[in-house]
Image (tube, helix red, strand yellow):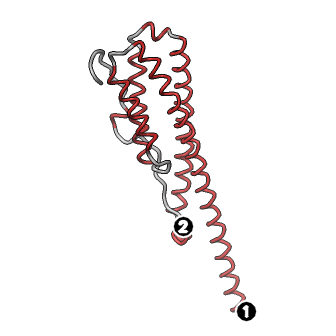
Amino acid sequence: MLTWIILTAVAAAAIAAIVLFNRLVRARQMANEAWSGIDVQLKRRAELVPNLVETVKGYAAHERGVLEDVIRLRSQAGALPRDDITGRAQTEGALTLALGKLMALAENYPDLKASRNFLDLQQQLATLENELQMARRYYNGAVRNQNVLVQSFPSNVVAGLFGFGERPFFEIGNDAERAAPQVALGTRS
Protein backbone atom coordinates (compact mmCIF):
# COMPACT_ATOMS: atom_id res chain seq x y z
CA MET A 1 0.00 0.00 0.00
CA LEU A 2 2.84 2.39 0.86
CA THR A 3 4.35 1.77 -2.58
CA TRP A 4 1.12 2.87 -4.27
CA ILE A 5 0.96 6.02 -2.18
CA ILE A 6 4.56 6.88 -3.07
CA LEU A 7 3.97 6.13 -6.76
CA THR A 8 0.81 8.24 -6.75
CA ALA A 9 2.64 11.15 -5.10
CA VAL A 10 5.52 10.91 -7.59
CA ALA A 11 3.07 10.73 -10.51
CA ALA A 12 1.14 13.73 -9.18
CA ALA A 13 4.38 15.71 -8.79
CA ALA A 14 5.47 14.75 -12.32
CA ILE A 15 2.11 15.77 -13.77
CA ALA A 16 2.24 19.08 -11.88
CA ALA A 17 5.78 19.70 -13.16
CA ILE A 18 4.67 18.97 -16.73
CA VAL A 19 1.70 21.31 -16.41
CA LEU A 20 3.89 24.08 -14.97
CA PHE A 21 6.55 23.51 -17.63
CA ASN A 22 3.93 23.82 -20.37
CA ARG A 23 2.56 27.04 -18.81
CA LEU A 24 6.09 28.46 -18.75
CA VAL A 25 6.65 27.49 -22.39
CA ARG A 26 3.32 29.07 -23.36
CA ALA A 27 4.19 32.27 -21.47
CA ARG A 28 7.62 32.43 -23.12
CA GLN A 29 6.10 31.95 -26.56
CA MET A 30 3.51 34.66 -25.91
CA ALA A 31 6.32 37.04 -24.92
CA ASN A 32 8.29 36.06 -28.05
CA GLU A 33 5.24 36.67 -30.21
CA ALA A 34 4.64 40.01 -28.52
CA TRP A 35 8.26 41.07 -29.06
CA SER A 36 7.93 40.11 -32.70
CA GLY A 37 4.96 42.50 -32.96
CA ILE A 38 7.04 45.35 -31.53
CA ASP A 39 9.91 44.48 -33.86
CA VAL A 40 7.63 44.63 -36.91
CA GLN A 41 6.27 48.06 -35.88
CA LEU A 42 9.78 49.38 -35.22
CA LYS A 43 10.89 48.19 -38.66
CA ARG A 44 7.91 49.90 -40.28
CA ARG A 45 8.76 53.11 -38.42
CA ALA A 46 12.42 52.85 -39.43
CA GLU A 47 11.35 52.57 -43.07
CA LEU A 48 9.03 55.58 -42.76
CA VAL A 49 11.56 57.90 -41.08
CA PRO A 50 13.79 58.55 -44.15
CA ASN A 51 10.76 59.62 -46.21
CA LEU A 52 9.66 61.96 -43.45
CA VAL A 53 13.14 63.45 -43.07
CA GLU A 54 13.50 63.99 -46.82
CA THR A 55 10.15 65.75 -46.97
CA VAL A 56 11.05 68.07 -44.10
CA LYS A 57 14.56 68.74 -45.46
CA GLY A 58 13.25 70.77 -48.35
CA TYR A 59 11.33 73.11 -46.07
CA ALA A 60 13.55 73.30 -43.03
CA ALA A 61 17.09 72.98 -44.33
CA HIS A 62 18.53 75.19 -41.60
CA GLU A 63 17.10 72.91 -38.89
CA ARG A 64 19.80 70.40 -39.66
CA GLY A 65 20.37 69.40 -36.00
CA VAL A 66 16.89 67.95 -35.56
CA LEU A 67 17.13 66.09 -38.87
CA GLU A 68 20.58 64.71 -38.05
CA ASP A 69 19.38 63.51 -34.64
CA VAL A 70 16.51 61.59 -36.21
CA ILE A 71 18.80 60.00 -38.80
CA ARG A 72 21.47 59.12 -36.20
CA LEU A 73 18.96 57.58 -33.79
CA ARG A 74 17.32 55.59 -36.57
CA SER A 75 20.73 54.15 -37.49
CA GLN A 76 21.51 53.35 -33.86
CA ALA A 77 18.19 51.58 -33.43
CA GLY A 78 18.78 49.52 -36.56
CA ALA A 79 22.27 48.51 -35.44
CA LEU A 80 21.18 47.05 -32.09
CA PRO A 81 20.68 43.30 -31.82
CA ARG A 82 17.05 42.23 -32.16
CA ASP A 83 17.03 40.64 -28.70
CA ASP A 84 18.56 43.65 -26.86
CA ILE A 85 15.20 44.73 -25.45
CA THR A 86 16.56 47.24 -22.95
CA GLY A 87 18.90 48.88 -25.46
CA ARG A 88 16.22 49.00 -28.13
CA ALA A 89 13.73 50.50 -25.67
CA GLN A 90 16.16 53.27 -24.77
CA THR A 91 17.13 54.03 -28.37
CA GLU A 92 13.56 53.85 -29.64
CA GLY A 93 12.46 56.17 -26.82
CA ALA A 94 15.09 58.70 -27.90
CA LEU A 95 13.96 58.30 -31.52
CA THR A 96 10.36 58.92 -30.47
CA LEU A 97 11.49 62.12 -28.76
CA ALA A 98 13.43 63.22 -31.86
CA LEU A 99 10.44 62.48 -34.09
CA GLY A 100 8.30 64.58 -31.75
CA LYS A 101 10.75 67.45 -32.21
CA LEU A 102 10.56 66.96 -35.96
CA MET A 103 6.76 67.15 -35.87
CA ALA A 104 6.86 70.20 -33.61
CA LEU A 105 9.32 71.80 -36.00
CA ALA A 106 6.86 71.32 -38.84
CA GLU A 107 4.36 73.52 -37.00
CA ASN A 108 6.58 76.51 -37.81
CA TYR A 109 6.52 75.92 -41.57
CA PRO A 110 3.03 76.54 -43.02
CA ASP A 111 4.04 75.33 -46.47
CA LEU A 112 5.35 72.08 -45.00
CA LYS A 113 2.22 71.60 -42.89
CA ALA A 114 0.12 72.05 -46.03
CA SER A 115 2.22 69.62 -48.09
CA ARG A 116 0.14 66.59 -49.04
CA ASN A 117 3.21 64.35 -48.86
CA PHE A 118 4.03 65.56 -45.34
CA LEU A 119 0.45 65.17 -44.19
CA ASP A 120 0.36 61.60 -45.50
CA LEU A 121 3.66 60.77 -43.80
CA GLN A 122 2.51 62.41 -40.57
CA GLN A 123 -0.69 60.33 -40.63
CA GLN A 124 1.26 57.15 -41.30
CA LEU A 125 3.62 57.93 -38.43
CA ALA A 126 0.74 58.66 -36.06
CA THR A 127 -0.91 55.37 -36.99
CA LEU A 128 2.38 53.53 -36.55
CA GLU A 129 2.99 55.09 -33.15
CA ASN A 130 -0.49 53.98 -32.02
CA GLU A 131 0.14 50.44 -33.26
CA LEU A 132 3.55 50.46 -31.60
CA GLN A 133 2.00 51.53 -28.30
CA MET A 134 -0.51 48.66 -28.53
CA ALA A 135 2.31 46.22 -29.35
CA ARG A 136 4.31 47.48 -26.36
CA ARG A 137 1.34 47.00 -24.04
CA TYR A 138 0.76 43.49 -25.36
CA TYR A 139 4.46 42.65 -24.96
CA ASN A 140 4.63 44.06 -21.43
CA GLY A 141 1.50 42.07 -20.49
CA ALA A 142 3.01 38.87 -21.87
CA VAL A 143 6.28 39.60 -20.03
CA ARG A 144 4.36 40.26 -16.81
CA ASN A 145 2.64 36.89 -17.12
CA GLN A 146 5.92 35.08 -17.77
CA ASN A 147 7.70 36.89 -14.93
CA VAL A 148 4.88 36.04 -12.51
CA LEU A 149 5.24 32.36 -13.39
CA VAL A 150 9.03 32.52 -13.07
CA GLN A 151 8.78 34.15 -9.64
CA SER A 152 5.79 32.26 -8.16
CA PHE A 153 5.92 29.02 -6.23
CA PRO A 154 5.82 26.22 -7.34
CA SER A 155 6.39 27.24 -10.95
CA ASN A 156 9.63 29.01 -9.94
CA VAL A 157 11.09 25.58 -9.06
CA VAL A 158 10.28 24.24 -12.52
CA ALA A 159 11.48 27.51 -14.11
CA GLY A 160 14.80 27.21 -12.30
CA LEU A 161 15.23 23.57 -13.31
CA PHE A 162 14.61 24.28 -16.98
CA GLY A 163 16.33 27.66 -17.31
CA PHE A 164 13.32 29.93 -17.65
CA GLY A 165 14.18 33.48 -16.65
CA GLU A 166 12.59 36.86 -16.29
CA ARG A 167 12.32 39.14 -19.30
CA PRO A 168 12.76 42.91 -19.32
CA PHE A 169 9.81 45.20 -19.94
CA PHE A 170 9.85 47.52 -22.95
CA GLU A 171 9.66 50.84 -21.19
CA ILE A 172 10.84 54.41 -21.35
CA GLY A 173 14.18 54.63 -19.64
CA ASN A 174 14.42 58.24 -18.54
CA ASP A 175 12.40 61.36 -17.84
CA ALA A 176 13.73 63.23 -20.90
CA GLU A 177 11.97 60.74 -23.17
CA ARG A 178 8.68 61.29 -21.31
CA ALA A 179 8.79 65.07 -21.75
CA ALA A 180 7.10 66.90 -24.61
CA PRO A 181 9.60 67.93 -27.29
CA GLN A 182 10.81 71.53 -27.24
CA VAL A 183 11.91 73.14 -30.49
CA ALA A 184 13.73 76.44 -30.77
CA LEU A 185 14.00 77.68 -34.33
CA GLY A 186 17.47 78.53 -35.53
CA THR A 187 19.27 76.61 -32.77
CA ARG A 188 20.35 73.02 -32.51
CA SER A 189 17.90 71.07 -30.30
| Horizontal relation, residue 188 to residue 111: left or right | left
Pick whichever, 11 or 83, lies toward us: 83
Pick whichever, 66 or 27, lies toward us: 66
Residue 34 x/y as whole percent: 58, 46
Residue 97 x/y as whole percent: 39, 30
Contact (Cβ within 8 Å) of mark 1 with mark 2: no
| Horizontal relation, residue 16 to residue 76: left or right | right
Residue type at mark 1: give it.
Met
Residue located at (40% from left, 41% from top): 90
Residue 12 x/y as whole percent: 68, 76
**Which badge, 1 or 2, is on the more N-terminal residue?**
1
Dot 1: element = loop
Disc 2 crowd rating (10 Å Cα; few below 14, some 14-19, many 20+) is: many
Q: CA distance from mark 1 to mark 2?
A: 33 Å
In which quadrant of the rendered image does the N terminus lie? bottom right
Q: Is residue 13 above or below residue 63?
A: below
Residue located at (48% from left, 22% from top): 52
**Mark 1 = which residue?**
1
In which quadrant of the rendered image does the C terminus lie? top left
Mark seen at residue 154: none
Residue located at (37% from left, 42% from top): 173
Residue 5 x/y as whole percent: 69, 86
Residue type at mark 2: give it.
Ala
